[in-house]
Image (cartoon, grey):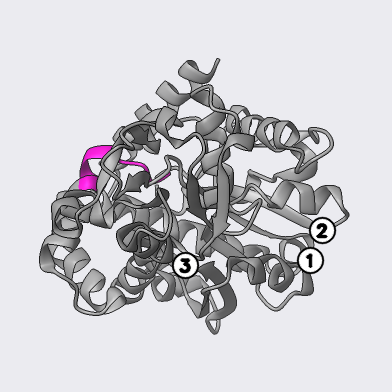
Amino acid sequence: MATAFVRRDALKLGLGVIVLGGGFASRAASVAAEAGPPLPISIITSDSNMTNTLIELIRRKRYLEDLELAPTILQVADASKVMPAMISGEADICVLNGISLLFPAIARGAKLKLLGGSCLLPQIAVYSSKPDIKSVADLKGRTIGTGALGALTHQLMVALLKKKGVDPATVTFRNVGSNADIFRAVVAGTVDAGPSGIDVYDQQAKYHTHSLSDGDLWTELPEYTYQGTFTSDRAIADKREALVRTLAAFARLYRFVQSPDSQDLFIQSYAKAVGNPDPAEAESTWTFIQKIRSYAVDIVLSEERIRYMQDLNVELGVQKSVLPTNEVADSSLAREALKLLA
């Protein structure tokens, strides 16, 4: 089953990239003509080099404004702040964020719904600066840097360890913070290994690190949905049109960033978002995106992917039982959004 749905998602990723150009511009013009004042929308997302770059890119392309939206975008370094902001109504929609903790929050009574996918494949590799750590099997008895227990990087590592037959109880997890913090800890040797972003994947020699032979998570855990988009029941009731337009704008972003035309603007956005890094990092990141094509250009998330994430939560003890798809997700808004791209 896993192989089948991963193949289907891969086909969607590849085919969706070609759906660009006049269709969206024409529909956006129609929306603008029919609309009144721009609709306010509050968007929240977590903080990482890749997410910051995509947010900078959507600002430069003005995809949200093209659909008569007045966006407020909040980026938080501490991912634990995302869920409270959504539950309280401080934010209307969360994009480009891990979804694993969404399901247990709903099980506890949070009135939230998964709307669709953002990044389907984990853009994460496991790095080490220790010469004797070459594969996941070598992590037994070692210290692994992650975020907080239950956070995205921690869950990814547990899933990887289990898949490779390594008991997570045989390693020590240390909360060192974000992806960038994890990589810094790996470089400094304060942890033995840790999962971090692909922006440094081609720069490993520079930092005297190496990725594990079986630590490329886009290959090892293709069934794991890395990032998604979710909202509150309140926002669906009160701001449905704004949510639909936001989904359409981000779908257009995902299509653009995976097209050859995006290279120059992506590199400029990366430099602005990350703070003028080595240009080689930006170019290698863009090249990786073109190769892996992990962004969900059609944004609708399959039931198989939703089930996998819940099954993993149950296995890890984060969630007591799998909830019906209609209790945790509403794909109707994403399907409406796709019509704006036609």
Which residue shows up at 56% across the image and 34% down it? 159
**What's the distance in space between the residues labelled 1 and 3, CA to CA?**
24 Å
Residue 126: horizontal and vertical position, in percent?
37, 44
Q: Three-letter amino acid code at disc 3? A: Val
Mark 2 neighbour density, 10 Å: few (under 14) some (14–19) many (20 or more): some
Identified at 75% across, 34% down, the residue is 314
Q: 88 above or below 259?
A: below
Q: Is residue 194 left or right of residue 210?
A: right
Of circles 1 and 3, which is in front?
A: 1
- Marks 2/1 in contact by CB < 8 Å: the verdict is yes
Alpha-carbon span between mark 3 and mark 2: 29 Å
Frontmost of labels 3 and 2 is 2
Q: Amino acid at mark 1?
A: Arg
Which portion, as a residue range, is magenta? 288-296
Which mark identifies residue 31? 3
Position above or below: 330 against 44: above
Q: Which residue is mark 1?
A: 234
- Callout 3: few (<14), some (14-19), or many (20+) C-alpha neighbours within 10 Å? some
Which tag, 3 or 2, sits closer to the chain's start?
A: 3
**In the image, is 177 to the left or to the right of 84?**
left
Return the residue at label 2: 111
In the rendered structure, the answer to whether residue 84 lies left or right of residue 70 reads right
Residue at mark 2 to residue at mark 1: CA–CA distance: 8 Å
- Which sits earlier in the primary sequence, circle 1 or circle 3? 3
Q: Secondary structure at mark 1?
A: helix
Q: Secondary structure at mark 2?
A: loop
Confirm whether residue 47 shows in the render.
yes
Q: Nearer the viewer, mark 2 or mark 1?
A: 2
Res 336 seen here: no
